[in-house]
Amino acid sequence: MREFKSFIRGRLLKLIGGFSRQTIAHQYLSGEGVEIGALNFPLELPFGARVRYVDRLTVSELRKHYPELAGVSLVNVDIKDDGETLTFIADGSQDFVIANHFLEHCENPILALKNMFRVLKRNGVVYFALPDKRFTFDRERSETGLDHLWKDYTDGPAGSRKEHFEEWVAKVEKLNDEAPARERMIYLMEIGYSIHFHVFTQGGMFKFLSLLKDRAGLEFEVKLCMGVNNEFIFILEKSGTDKI
C-alpha cells in the first residue's frame, strides 16, 4: 500500500477559530444532495443547497427503535433506504452526500463509501464526521484493523456481527456477567440495534482511505480533514467517472 500522504493534495487542519461543521459545509456544499442518518442533528447547509434525508427507518419507526430520543425533533425521512447501499438513489445524481457519525454504524464501511461515490456526480463531495474512539465511550475498544474492514467487504459482515455485539456489550455497556451479557447481546442483534460496529482514529482513517484507493478502486481527492474535540471531519471529492 502506498503511503496515504502521496495522494493528499488538500488541507489537513486542526481546529482554529471560526471553523465548525457549518463553516466547512458552507465552503464545500452546493447544489442537491442527501444526508444519511441525520436523526435530530442535521447539518446546517448554505443558502441554496437542497437536501433529502435518508434513513433505514421512517420517523415513527425511529421513535420506537430509539426511545432515548423521545421528545427530540427528528428530520423528516424523505427516502427510506439502507444508507450502506443507497438502492433508491441513481448513479451520478448527487452533488453531495453527508454522512455524519454514520460510518462507525456501518457493518460494511467500504461498501457504504463505494455507494456514496456511486451516486455522486464527478467532482461531487462526501462530507463525513466520525467520532475519534480515543475520546468517546469506544475508548476501551481496539481500533478496527484494515484487514478486518476488508474482510467485512469481501466476505460480508455476517461473520463478524456477533463479535461486534459482544464487544459492544462488554466494553461500552460494561456488562461482564456471562448470562446478562449474552441476553443483552442477543436482544440487540434481534432488533438490529445500530451500535458502533467499527471504531476509528484520525490516523487510522487516512490509512483506510488509502486502502479504498489502492484496493477498492475509488478515485477521490482528500480536500480537507479537521479534528475538533472528539470528532474529525473529512471532505472527499470524487474524481474519475460518474460511476464507481
Image (cartoon, rainbow, N blue to C red):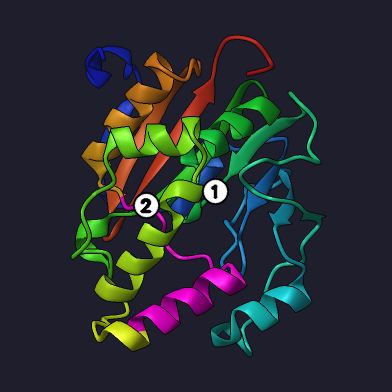
Residue situated furthest front in the rendering: 179
Instruction: Please tell me which residue is depicted at 35% across the width and 23% down the height of the picture.
Output: 211
Which is closer to the viewer, label 2 or label 1? 2
Residue 173 horizontal side relative to residue 185, left or right: left
Using the image, determine if residue 24 lies above or below residue 141. Answer: above
Label 2 is placed on what type of residue?
Answer: His
Q: Secondary structure at mark 2?
A: loop
Q: Secondary structure at mark 1?
A: loop
Residue 19 horizontal side relative to residue 204, left or right: right
Badge number at residue 198: 2
Label 1 is placed on what type of residue?
Answer: Ala
Crowd around label 1: few <14 · some 14–19 · many ≥20 (10 Å): many
Q: Position of residue 28 (x, y in %)?
A: 53, 35
Q: Quick check: can you spot residue 73?
A: no
Residue 75 horizontal side relative to residue 156, left or right: right
Residue tagged by mark 1? Answer: 99
> How many numbered marks have been drawn onto this rendered protein structure?
2
Using the image, determine if residue 10 lies above or below residue 191. Answer: above
Report how far apart the C-alphas of labels 2 and 1 lie in the structure.
Answer: 15 Å
Using the image, determine if residue 13 lies above or below residue 52. Answer: above
Reading the chain from its start, which is encountered first: label 2 or label 1? 1
Region of the chain picked out in magenta, as a range? 181-199
Q: Quick check: can you spot residue 222?
A: yes
Magenta-drawn stretch contains 198 = yes
Magenta-drawn stretch contains 203 = no
Q: Position of residue 14 (x, y in %)?
A: 23, 43
Q: Nearer the viewer, residue 17 or 232?
A: 232
Instruction: Please tell me which residue is depicted at 40% across the width and 66% down the height of the picture.
Output: 165
Q: Position of residue 81 (x, y in %)?
A: 74, 51
Residue 6 horizontal side relative to residue 189, left or right: left
Quadrant where the N terminus lies? top left
